[in-house]
Image (cartoon, rainbow, N blue to C red):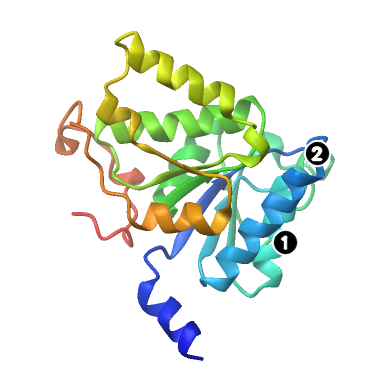
C-alpha cells in the first residue's frame, strides 16, 4: 500500500498519447514492449490516448490499458473507421474529419507523448510533436521507446542534423529516450525544456492544442 501511495504522489501525467504501429512487426520484442508500456501506464494509473483501432501494437497497448481499468481514448478519422481497416476501437471513440484534426485532438488530450516502433505514420507523428515543441506550441515531454534499437538510424540522422548545423543541440534534447517503459516515463517526468522557442506561444492560435490538465498557462 505504501508503494501505491508513493506512486500516486509522484504521478505527473494523467494521460499519455502513444504513437505506434497498426502492425505488430516481425519481432516479438515489439509486442512485448507495447504490453510492458501498457502495464506501466496501468500501474501508474495513467490514461491512454491513441489513434484508435485494435490492430497491431495499437491494439495491444489499448487493450492492456483498458483491461487494467484506466481510461482509453481512441481518436480516429472517418475514413479509417471501418472495421476492415482499423478494427474496433477500444474504450471511448472520438471520430474526426481528417489526419490533421486527429493529431490536434490527440495533442489536446495528452500531457505527454511516447512513440513505440511503427511505420511512416508513427514517425511522422513523433516528428511533428518534436517540431511543435521546438516552435513553442507545447512544452509536453516527447518520449521514444527505442525497442531493440529500432530507431537507431533515425537518432543518428538527428545527430547528423546537429553536426551539419540544421538542429540546435538544445533542440536535440527535446526527445527523451530509453529502451524500457519504466525508465522512459521516469525520464519524461524529469524533463524540462532547455531549447529556445522559435516563436512565443501567444503568437500562435493553438488553444485547441492545449490540454486543460497540463498545468500550462
Check disc 1 and report its element: helix, strand or loop: helix
At x 72%, y 61%, the residue is: 63
- Disc 1 crowd, CA 10 A, few/some/many (<14, 14-19, 20+): some
At x 81%, y 45%, the residue is: 28
Please tell me which residue lies in front, 178 or 17: 178
- Residue 63: which disc? 1
At x 55%, y 32%, the residue is: 99
Please tell me which residue lies in front, 92 or 110: 110
Instruction: Please indicate whether residue 171 sits to the left or right of residue 186 in the image.
Output: left
Residue 145, given in percent of the width and then of the height, sits at 56, 44
- Disc 2 crowd, CA 10 A, few/some/many (<14, 14-19, 20+): few
Q: From what the image shows, is residue 87 above or below residue 152?
A: below
Residue for badge 2: 27
| Nearer mark to the viewer, of 1 and 2 | 2
Q: Distance between the residues labelled 1 and 2?
A: 20 Å
Residue 38, image quadrant: bottom right
Q: Which of pointers 1 and 2 lies earlier in the amino acid sequence?
A: 2
Farthest-out residue, bottom: 1
Amino acid at each position: 500500500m505504501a508503494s501505491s501511495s508513493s506512486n500516486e504522489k509522484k504521478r505527473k501525467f494523467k494521460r499519455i498519447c502513444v504513437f505506434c504501429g497498426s502492425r505488430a512487426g516481425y519481432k516479438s520484442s515489439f509486442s512485448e514492449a507495447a504490453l510492458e508500456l501498457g502495464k506501466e501506464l496501468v500501474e501508474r494509473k495513467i490514461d491512454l490516448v491513441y489513434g484508435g483501432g485494435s490492430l497491431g501494437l495499437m491494439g495491444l497497448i489499448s487493450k492492456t490499458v483498458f483491461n487494467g481499468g484506466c481510461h482509453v481514448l481512441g481518436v480516429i478519422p472517418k475514413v479509417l473507421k471501418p472495421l476492415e481497416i482499423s478494427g474496433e476501437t477500444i474504450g471511448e471513440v472520438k471520430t474526426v474529419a481528417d489526419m490533421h484534426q486527429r493529431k490536434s485532438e490527440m495533442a489536446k488530450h495528452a500531457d505527454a507523448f511516447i512513440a513505440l516502433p511503427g511505420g511512416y505514420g508513427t514517425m511522422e507523428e513523433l516528428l511533428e510533436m518534436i517540431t511543435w515543441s521546438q516552435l513553442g506550441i507545447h512544452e509536453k515531454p516527447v518520449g521514444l521507446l527505442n525497442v531493440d534499437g529500432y530507431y537507431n538510424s533515425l537518432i543518428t540522422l538527428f545527430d547528423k542534423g546537429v553536426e551539419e548545423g540544421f538542429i540546435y543541440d538544445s533542440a536535440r534534447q527535446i526527445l527523451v529516450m530509453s529502451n524500457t517503459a519504466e525508465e522512459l516515463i521516469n525520464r519524461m517526468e524529469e524533463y524540462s525544456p532547455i531549447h529556445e522557442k522559435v516563436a512565443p506561444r501567444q503568437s500562435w492560435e493553438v488553444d485547441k492544442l492545449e490540454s486543460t490538465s497540463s498545468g500550462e498557462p
